[in-house]
Each structure stands twice: as structure tokens, then as C-alpha cells.
Image (spheres, grey):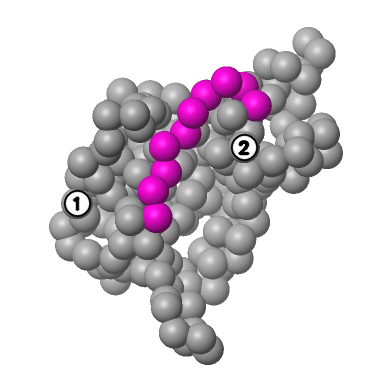
Amino acid sequence: MPHAADPPLLLPPTVLLSYDAARLDALVVTHFAREAVLGLDCEWRPTFRPGQPPSPTALVQLSSASVCVLFPVAHLRACPPRLAALLNDGAVWKVGCGVRGDVERLLRDLGVTVRGIFDAAVAGQALGYASPGLKGLCAAFGVALHKTKRVSLSNWEARPLQQRQQDYAAQDAFVSLQVVLWLHGKHGDGVQLLDWIAANA
């Protein structure tokens, strides 16, 4: 359980998890069909021995401002088709801090090419933020982000995922989107969000 001094988790109103590929595809259509910008993040089982090859991607998280869907790809035969199509759609921006590393993983592990990529860490650095990671950017906007290694280094291939894992994963994707909205709000200079993202991608 979080300590009393820990800040509350930053979560969207709804977090959804399913182990059924057809159900996950339906969630993509229901919740993301009209979204132009989504927070993207991935999790994988950590490795602790030097020289040990990296674990494959276990979980993919996509979040709008209202819903985060968790895709436990470690337990699916393949990436759900509508998820793959959404990730490949260059008209929908996938945003995150260090998101290019996740993009490389998705290509290597799932054979999915992600298009429409905006790395908030790269943009934050270009805009002069000293700590352009997710936690540092949150702090720059006066928001305390609670992240613990006990959860980040947990087994992301577990089934079912513990509630604290679900919350941690959803927070990463949701806050990735929020950070981009905050950056645009401060540095957008009246430019529309999608135009600003495209100019700074």
C-alpha cells in the first residue's frame, strides 16, 4: 500500500484490461476511434542478470483523457488487428516520454510499425527543461508523480496483473498524454494542438 505521504496516483476515469483479443479490438473502436492524440507506454518483465537478453514486451498501454486500455500482449497470440492498425496510423499521434524505445520494442516483439510518434522527453529537452523525463516534466508543472520500483520492477507477465500494476501502467500512459497537453498549453503560442505536435515531433 502507498505510504501516507505518497501523492495520489494520476489516473484517467476508466482503466480497462482484457485478455480476449476480440474484446480488446472492440475497446479500440469504442474508445479510440475519434481520438487524434493518445498516450502510449509499454511494460516488460525486468531482467537482473548481466548479459541476459531483454524480456519481450508484456503490456501495451494506450490512454485518452478519459480511458486507458491495457493490452496484455504477453498472453495474446498476436497483436490485436485493430490495435496494430491504430499504432500504424500516422494520423493519430502516439505520445510519451522515451516513446521511441517503446516503438522499437513493438516492432521487434510484435512486428508492429508505429507511426505518428511524439517524444515528450525530446520536446521537453528542446524547450529547455532540465529534467525532461516523465517525473521531471510533471514536477515542472507542479505535479508530483508517484512511481515505485517495487511495481516498475515487478513481473509484468503475471496473469492476472495486480491492481497496483494496472494502476501504475495506466498512470504512465495517461500522464504521458497530460504532459504533452501541458507543454502545448505553455508553449503552443496559440497554435492548434495537432499542428504544434507536428512541428515539434
Of 104 and 25, nearer the camera is 104
Range drawn in magenta: 140-149
Task: Find the distance from the CA under tag 1 to the CA under tag 2.
Answer: 26 Å
- Dot 1 amino acid type: Gln
Tag 1 near tag 2, CB within 8 Å: no
Q: Quadrant of the N terminus?
A: top left
Number of other residues with Cα within 10 Å of mark 1, as a class: few under 14, some 14 to 19, many 20 or more? some
Q: Secondary structure at mark 2?
A: helix
Name the side, left or right, on which 35 lies relative to 44. Answer: right
Measured from the top left, where is residue 23 in percent x and y?
Answer: 22, 47
Q: Secondary structure at mark 1?
A: loop
- The answer to whether residue 81 shows anywhere in this view is no
The residue furthest left is: 160
**Residue 168 in the image: above or below residue 45:** above
Q: Nearer the viewer, mark 1 or mark 2?
A: 2
- Say which residue appears at 77% left-offset and 18% top-offset: 188
Report the residue marked by disc 2. 136
Magenta-drawn stretch contains 141: yes
The residue furthest top is: 190
Count how many numbered circles sit on residues in the image: 2
Report the residue marked by disc 1. 162
Quadrant assignment, res 74: bottom left
- Dot 2 amino acid type: Gly
Magenta-drawn stretch contains 111: no
